[in-house]
């Protein structure tokens, strides 16, 4: 494997190092922790140059063969060195030469019980889906559990996991966002009160994260719940993988090993010989295509599970015929007022945090831009600050225009803070709660806020995508969507798919009990086919039309893509690097290499960025080409340019 640059060491007397063992080795002037990936082989180096292993670390289970096979697959497919892939898949404490804390070394005192306390009995559709998946336990199958919002996909997961636990197996459940783990964790702990549950995500402190990883690796945890990194944990009794909200882009890692946790989970299920369940109301087009191609089996939940609950009525608000009040249509404000009178909750969704996206001078046209990025600074009124949402740079709001001296600077556009302010002025007695990445920085605080909303301690919610994913608010009957049009004019071919998904998901928060739900979507393009499909709750029709467009245009999933990206202090340096890279390896006829171009956001964090796109209708042909290219690139070190390969890219900004 060309990217698997390994180092040779000898095992001195008294140390029997096996494949999968963690060892301490000399590396230059220091000692490092390494993982044995081959043993009993003869080194090509002279024996005098082969240094001995210092010591064997036995404070964690030996990494199993199937886990190492997963690492080899990820290394080869995503074109990263095997050593980096293996080490980065371990929690930080397990990469260190320091011994593990005593508190995480203690094995579980007692075996867990598989006792299951269901929240609800299954509907007929849920039972059919669960029985079909349960019949596949013990062998590999990939299921698309396609259920409308509120159809009870989680309840199906619980009953299926109960079957797995009865057999003594482990279940891995992946969610896209850390913000979803507290709610799901509570559901799982209530359903399986005597089963050990390991929680794995990047928001955990080192000690609890290491402890959870060890419980998973020892087979002590019956359920492992986490974000994308949880797919990298060893699981000796793995019998089921669930990928909830499988369409979510958060499952794709965007730095280092740029892997898709969704795709890695399906491959891992194949290695383990167990089912993989991909659950969502709005499948990714790749997953939909896999079902259409016969690779996955689709199980449909077409109705909501709660008695009397129906999908909300979706109404398109034509902004060409309504004058806005601070970005809100009179019909939306009237609908919110009606809900307040009935003590029902409303959600105003705008996928833009901050107060306003632009600070501008009307006298000369100046706008506040980030000095380190080709992007505008966002106004955050509460802190009297300008922030860049791309690099994190922050500065004070200027008292006057730096170009012409005009003191009448105005915020243009709207973010969640400004919408919150507008609603507070319109409805002075209402309890308004804003949830975005600025207001929900702490996991415990977010969990308390969400619990308060579920108890009815809020009248109007203002939020971004954090509120669109997986939350169940019983009293919420109205959803208003602002600024939905931006994605319709995007150059990204994935923009319509993402817009439909987020609108369908946020619409699905309304009317999840017996009270009818309503969704108002503000737009200046009311005749757009996307809104017609949304109003009919017709994902199937939307997906088929999108796939037809993708096929005619030559876009994924009908072709496979990779992007070589470069960053440098000067754009010309990055472009030159990419041109040279394109000439390093002659692409086969099945692979097309495009000319290098600047990123849409060309400068970020002080570096100029460009990319080279590669496409092929043959995945093996593209992989062979990438392997040859990456091997040449790793041999050519460049301090002036930072580069990486992104296989199956989903972001092009």
Image (cartoon, grey):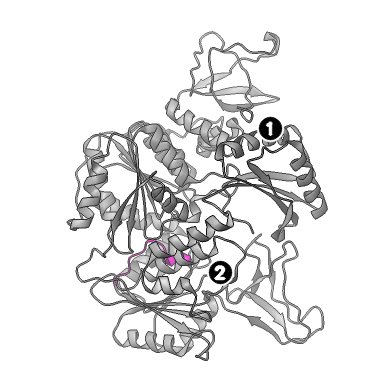
Q: Quadrant of residue 456?
A: bottom left
Range shown magenta: 465-474
Give the residue drawn at x 76%, y 34%: 636
Q: Position of residue 6 (x, y in %)?
A: 62, 24
Whether 403 is among the magenta residues is no
Q: Is residue 328 left or right of residue 376?
A: left
Q: Nearer the viewer, residue 99 or 298?
A: 298
- How crowded is the residue under tag 1: few (<14 C-alpha within 10 Å), some, or many (20+)? some
Q: Position of residue 632 (x, y in %)?
A: 72, 33
Q: Which residue is mark 1?
A: 631
Give the residue drawn at x 36%, y 64%: 471
Q: Tell me, for residue 487, which label it has, or none.
A: 2
Q: Is residue 170 left or right of residue 226?
A: left
Q: Nearer the viewer, residue 281 or 47?
A: 281
Q: Is residue 562 left or right of residue 577?
A: left
Give the residue drawn at x 31%, y 76%: 517
- How crowded is the residue under tag 2: few (<14 C-alpha within 10 Å), some, or many (20+)? some
Q: Nearer the viewer, residue 460 or 651?
A: 651
Q: Position of residue 23 (x, y in %)?
A: 54, 23
Q: Quadrant of residue 581?
A: top right
Q: Is residue 3 visible?
A: yes
Q: Nearer the viewer, residue 36 or 641?
A: 641
Q: Tell me, for residue 104, which label it has, or none.
A: none
Q: Which quadrant is home to the C terminus?
A: bottom right
Residue 456 in the image: above or below residue 106 = below
Q: Is residue 428 visible?
A: no
Which secondary structure, mark 1?
Answer: helix
Residue 18 in the image: above or below residue 354 = above
């Amino acid at each position: 494997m060309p990217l698997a640059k390994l180092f040779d060491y000898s095992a001195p007397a008294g140390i029997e190092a096996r494949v999968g063992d963690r060892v301490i080795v000399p590396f230059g002037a220091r000692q490092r922790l390494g993982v044995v990936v081959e043993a009993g082989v003869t080194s090509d180096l002279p024996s005098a140059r082969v240094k001995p292993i210092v010591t064997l670390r036995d404070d964690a289970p030996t990494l199993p063969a199937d886990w190492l096979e997963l690492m080899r697959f990820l290394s080869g497919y995503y074109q990263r060195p095997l050593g980096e892939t293996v080490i980065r898949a371990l929690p930080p404490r397990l990469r260190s030469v320091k011994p593990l804390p005593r508190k995480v070394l203690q094995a579980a005192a007692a075996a867990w019980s598989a006792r299951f306390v269901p929240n609800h009995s299954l509907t007929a559709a849920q039972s059919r889906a669960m029985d079909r998946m349960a019949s596949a336990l013990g062998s590999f199958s990939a299921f698309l559990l396609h259920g409308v919002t509120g159809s009870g996909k989680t309840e199906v997961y619980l009953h299926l996991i109960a079957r797995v636990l009865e057999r003594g197996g482990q279940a891995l459940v992946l969610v896209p966002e850390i913000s979803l783990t507290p709610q799901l964790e509570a559901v799982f702990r209530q359903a399986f009160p005597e089963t050990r549950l390991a929680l794995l995500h990047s928001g955990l402190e080192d000690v609890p994260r290491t402890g959870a990883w060890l419980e998973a690796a020892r087979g002590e945890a019956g359920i492992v719940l986490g974000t994308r990194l949880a797919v990298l944990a060893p699981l000796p009794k793995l019998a089921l993988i669930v990928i909830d909200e499988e369409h979510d882009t958060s499952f794709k890692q965007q730095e280092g090993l740029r892997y898709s946790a969704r795709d890695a989970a399906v491959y891992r299920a194949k290695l383990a010989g167990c089912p993989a369940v991909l659950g969502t109301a709005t499948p990714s087009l790749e997953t939909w295509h896999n079902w259409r191609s016969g690779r996955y089996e689709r199980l449909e939940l077409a109705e909501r599970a709660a008695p009397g609950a129906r999908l909300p009525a979706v109404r398109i608000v034509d902004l060409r015929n309504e004058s806005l009040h601070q970005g809100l249509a009179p019909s939306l404000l009237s609908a919110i007022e009606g809900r307040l009178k009935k003590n029902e909750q409303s959600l105003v969704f705008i996928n833009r945090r901050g107060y306003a996206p632009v600070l501008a001078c009307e006298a000369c046209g100046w706008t506040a831009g980030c000095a380190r990025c080709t992007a505008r600074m966002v106004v955050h009124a509460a802190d009297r600050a300008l922030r860049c949402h791309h690099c994190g740079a922050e500065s004070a709001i200027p008292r006057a225009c730096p170009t012409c001296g005009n003191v009448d600077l105005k915020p243009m556009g709207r973010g969640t803070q400004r919408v919150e302010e507008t609603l507070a002025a319109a409805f002075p007695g209402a309890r308004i709660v804003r949830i975005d990445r600025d207001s929900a920085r702490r996991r415990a605080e977010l969990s308390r806020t969400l619990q308060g909303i579920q108890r009815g301690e809020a009248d109007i919610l203002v939020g971004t995508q954090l509120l669109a994913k997986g939350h169940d608010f019983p009293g919420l009957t109205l959803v208003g969507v602002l600024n939905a049009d931006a994605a319709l004019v995007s150059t990204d071919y994935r923009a319509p798919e993402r817009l439909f998904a987020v609108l369908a998901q946020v619409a699905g928060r309304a009317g999840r009990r017996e009270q009818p739900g309503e969704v108002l979507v503000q737009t200046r393009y009311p005749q757009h086919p996307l809104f017609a499909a949304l109003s009919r709750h017709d994902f199937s029709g939307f997906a088929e039309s999108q796939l037809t467009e993708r096929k005619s245009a030559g876009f994924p999933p009908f072709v496979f893509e990779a992007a070589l990206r470069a960053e440098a202090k000067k754009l010309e340096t990055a472009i030159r690097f990419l041109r040279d890279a394109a000439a390093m390896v002659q692409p086969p006829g099945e692979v097309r290499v495009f000319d290098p171009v600047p990123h849409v956001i060309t400068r970020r964090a002080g570096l100029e960025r460009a990319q080279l796109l590669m496409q092929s209708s043959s995945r093996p042909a593209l992989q062979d080409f990438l392997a040859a290219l990456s091997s040449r690139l790793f041999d050519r070190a460049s301090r002036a340019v930072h580069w990486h390969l992104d296989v199956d890219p989903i972001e092009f900004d």
